[in-house]
Image (spheres, rainbow, N blue to C red):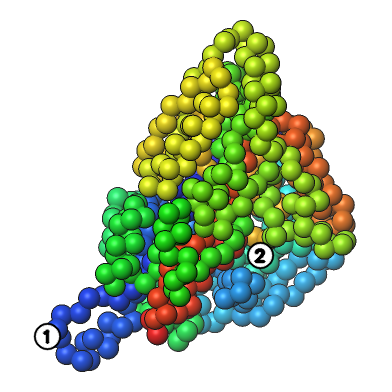
Amino acid sequence: MRKRGQKFLAGSLVLGVLALAACGANEGDSGKSKDKQAGESKVVNVMETTAVPSVNPITADNGASFKVVNQVFEGLYRLDKKGKPELALAAKEPTVKNNGKTFIFDIRKDANWSDGSPVTAADFEFAWKKVVDPKTAAAYGPQMEEIVKNATQILKGELPPSELGIKALGKKKLQIDLENPVPIFKELLTTGTFFPQKEAQLKKEGDRYGTNSDTLLSNGPFLLKNWDSTSQTFDYVKNPKYWDKKNVKADKIHVTVVKDTNAALNLYNTGKLDRVELDGDFVKQFENDKEFHKMTTGRSVYMKMNQGKDGVKTDLANLNIRRGLAMAIDKTGLVDTLLANGSKPLDGDVPGGIMFSPENGKDFRKINGPLLTYNKDEAKTYFEKGLKELGKTELTLTLTAGDTSLIKKQTEFIQNQLESNLPGLTVKLKNVPTQVSFKADVTQDFELLLGGWGGDYQDPLTYLNLFLTGSPGNHTGFSNAKYDELVLGAKGKLANDLNKRFDALLEAERILLKDNAVLIPLYQGGRAYLEKASLGDYIAYPIGTENYKWLHKK
């Protein structure tokens, strides 16, 4: 079994992370001057559903944190408005050598930190080496595994971090060495794990770094202000040192944490928000409104089942119990009746309409087909067989999830489905604040956990990589040597043969779900929302977090 650092992410894995976002004008005082009011037109209001636990790209372990990281930090590339990588801190496309395994980047001369000091190649080298250092126990350290040269051995403790394939060739020149050519490398460089950090600032702040806005030194479009890990409000302020500040249109984005959809809608209807996401009855109420919009995302929503840890197995280590649970939920009823926001039933891990075969262009999801589909009769048969194997006649399980209004509705639906279709099963609900759900996932302190994954880049690997032995996001007790071989091969030795690589990922998903029923797949997420015509360039990608760089009031 492969070993890695133990502090792994809950992040995008926890459904509660999905933040409702809404933007609108500040209410003006009628006595204010016209100049003052004109200035306030560049202030945007955004809503989130959870407080942000931390903002350190090296150790961030949840989607709420990475969403903030994306606004205040930047790497060599950034996603453009259409979700494609474009040059950011890299001054130009790199020089590529060694048959696609060595990249030499020139960093922009005008790339600076928020204190005015230059972003250097050494900042990238420091950050990347700290990410893979087992002492850091960085949640996303394994993102570099089998990709950046020597990352795998370093994560295992077999080589020192100094051997990682990255080095500063000069103040603004950076060399990166890979294990193999990587077709998704440019996309990876847009994610927070690959961002630079200034060593002096981290050493100065120590464990306080990233716990409040005063400790941060950032290099992205915005500065973070008035924030700590418990804040219910905070601000993004335009960064005057940002190299592309001319294209950052909002002077300030004010964030308020609101968990309840009804409360958010009230704010929207009273002119205090310019965008609000909807579900269920709210969708039906507003679906004919001219401000109503709907989209399908690349978010895979599922429940994890804890099979055990540290050598101690749970009842969910029984394959028939897991299969019974995974086939006992009417997903169509869940998405059509409860959500009604464009979500689609999902019988796999990798969503549809996102990933396509390099050989024939066919959808990954359609090629693999349904792997765990709703069938209450088969579910009952599997569950009864599992109970018999356990020597039990009944089973009680606790479902842990976030505490937003939408998540509570989903857990109640799931509870009803499981108890109705599986006689002998009792499901207790444990709706807790999102940060508590994060911790439960990271520590594997749950029986059932409602979660999901939004993906970081457009490739099946972003979903399947999570369930490698000991990998971030696993926390299920699942470990399978063949699965590891296939997924690691897709990251490494198969990178030059795109067809074999794609086939390996297809087989890996079948092992994960059809053979082992590691997850209870539920749905591919959708978004239904109301948005005022006055809101411009609210960029929400099907895969990846929001990008506020261009957000503005028209």
Amino acid on which the number 1 mark rests in the picture: Gly
Q: Is residue 409 above or below residue 91?
A: above
Q: In this orientation, which residue lies closer to the viewer: 235 or 447?
A: 447
Q: Along the polypeptide, which appears first: circle 1 or circle 2?
A: 1
Image coordinates for residue 145, horizontal then vertical, percent = 68, 48
- Please tell me whether mark 1 sits on a helix, a strand or a loop: loop
- Judging by the rendered image, the residue that carries numbered circle 2 is 187
Q: In this orientation, which residue lies closer to the viewer: 166 or 370?
A: 370
Q: In this orientation, which residue lies closer to the viewer: 196 or 80?
A: 80
Amino acid on which the number 2 mark rests in the picture: Glu
Residue at image position (58%, 31%) is 305
In the image: residue 38, left or right of residue 442 = left
In the image: residue 46, left or right of residue 86 = left
The answer to whether residue 57 shows anywhere in this view is no
Q: Is residue 521 above or below residue 169?
A: above
Within 10 Å of the Cα at label 2, are there few (<14), some (14-19), or many (20+) other Cα atoms?
A: some
Residue at image position (52%, 26%) is 419
- Please tell me whether mark 2 sits on a helix, a strand or a loop: helix
Locate the C terminus and report the quarter of the image it occupies: bottom left
Q: In this view, does 542 lie above or below 482?
A: below
Tell which residue pokes out farthest to the bottom in this image.
34
Residue at image position (22%, 91%) is 35
Residue at image position (54%, 44%) is 334
- Judging by the rendered image, the residue that carries numbered circle 1 is 31
The answer to whether residue 267 shows anywhere in this view is yes
User: Is label 1 in contact with label 2 (beta carbons under 8 Å)?
Assistant: no
In the rendering, which numbered label is found on residue 219? none
Image coordinates for residue 68, horizontal then vertical, percent = 43, 61
Image coordinates for residue 197, horizontal then vertical, percent = 49, 62
Find the distance from the CA under tag 1 to the CA under tag 2.
49 Å
Image coordinates for residue 64, horizontal then vertical, percent = 44, 54
